[in-house]
Structure formats: structure tokens, C-alpha cells
Image (spheres, rainbow, N blue to C red):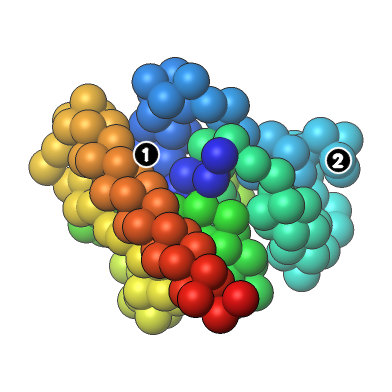
Amino acid sequence: MENVVLFGFMGAGKTVVGKEVARKLCMEFVDMDDIIEEKEGCSISEIFAEKGEKHFREVESEAARSLSRREGLVIATGGGVVLDRKNVDALQLSGAGICLTASPEVIYERVKNESHRPLLLTDNPLKRIRSLLRYRAPFYAKVKYRIDTSDLPAESVVENILGIVKKDREISAATRSRGGENADLKS
Ligand code: S3P
């Protein structure tokens, strides 16, 4: 079964919503940050502080590669996984890629009381969110589907995702069956 891959900025709701999507579709939920923490034996904050962002991105790319070889997963990616185009391409080849978006203000409200995201530990997190979002916009634009979650409760985001997955699977099935017909004609 094809994967469902959730992309989007920190605080977009990938983990909360992804768990529920996995439950409804009877699929396994995987959070990429958890895989990275397990592999490195320490928290994301510790990886950034002790080994640096470059090392984190390398481990993140390895996790993206290995998850994209698996099937039947709902994957919540880390917000920066899109920075390497190869990650996005590999993950989207494994299933439907959906980018959850939200305005900088909404993201700020959602993350302001949390402290586990090293990139947002600055004097002015809202300013950092705005500038990262501006920089990353073309990278998130490579994801096939998108949902603006700014004004949506989590249940509605889940319903939207289920609709996209259904449509995407129908398209894949139709494409496969057309490929089959062509293969028959060629033989
Ligand atoms: C990051 C997002 C985080 C985590 C790390 C870097 C980013 O994941 O991977 O702190 O670069 O946007 P979430 O999007 O799950 O918070």
C-alpha cells in the first residue's frame, strides 16, 4: 500500500493529524524526528547543539531514504526535510505527498509554549518563523497537494487528507490499469 507523506512547517499539525489519519486508514504512523532521535540516541535539540544542523540534515536524509523504501506508512516529516529536493522526490515516489500550511501568526500561537525546536529558540520566534517560511516557500511548493490548516480544526484537516488520499489512490489505480492495457498492446 502506498504511503501518505505529510510535509509542512513546524507547528503545521503533521504529528497530531498524522496519527489520526493512520488510525482511520489502519496504517502505521511514523514520525521522522522520532526515528532520527532513536538512531542518534539523543534529542533533536542535542543533535543540533552537539553535532550541528548539517549533521542533523544528513541523518534526516538517511531517514527519508529508508522510509521511502517502506510501504503502508503515514509519515510525519520534519519541517526542514524539503530543503533537499532528493528527500521530497523519494518520499513522494512512495506515496501521496501533502503539505500542511498555516500563517506565521497561527504557527507562532501553536509553538510558542514549546521548547524542543532549536530553530525557534530565538529572541523573536515570530520573526524567525516569517523568514524561514519565506525562504522555504519554493521548497514546500514541490509537494503535490496542500491544505491550509490556519482556520481548520484537526478533524477537518484529517477529513481533507482522507479525501486527497482516496482521490490519489484512484488516480494511481487508473494509471496502473492504463499502463497494463498499453503493456498488453505492446506484447
Ligand atoms: C525542523 C523541524 C522539526 C525538527 C527540527 C528541524 C525544521 O520538526 O525536524 O527541529 O527545520 O523545520 P517538526 O516540523 O516536526 O517540528
For the point 81% across and 34% down, which residue is it? 38
Q: In the image, residue 112 lies at what x, y percent?
A: 37, 40
Quadrant in the picture for residue 101: bottom left
Q: Residue furthest left?
A: 151
For the point 18% across and 47% down, which residue is it? 150
Q: CA distance from mark 1 to mark 2?
A: 24 Å
What secondary structure is found at the residue carrying circle 1?
A: loop
N-terminal of the pair, mark 1 or mark 2, is 1
Image side of residue 154 versus residue 51, left or right = left
Badge 2 amino acid: Lys
Q: Is residue 3 above or below residue 119?
A: above
Q: Which residue is mark 1?
A: 13
Q: In the image, residue 176 lies at what x, y percent?
A: 46, 60
Disc 2 residue lies near ligand 1 with CB under 8 A: no
Quarter of the image with the N terminus is top right
Badge 1 amino acid: Gly
Tell whether label 2 touches label 1 (CB within 8 Å). no
For the point 36% across and 74% down, which residue is it? 141
Q: Which residue is mark 2?
A: 39
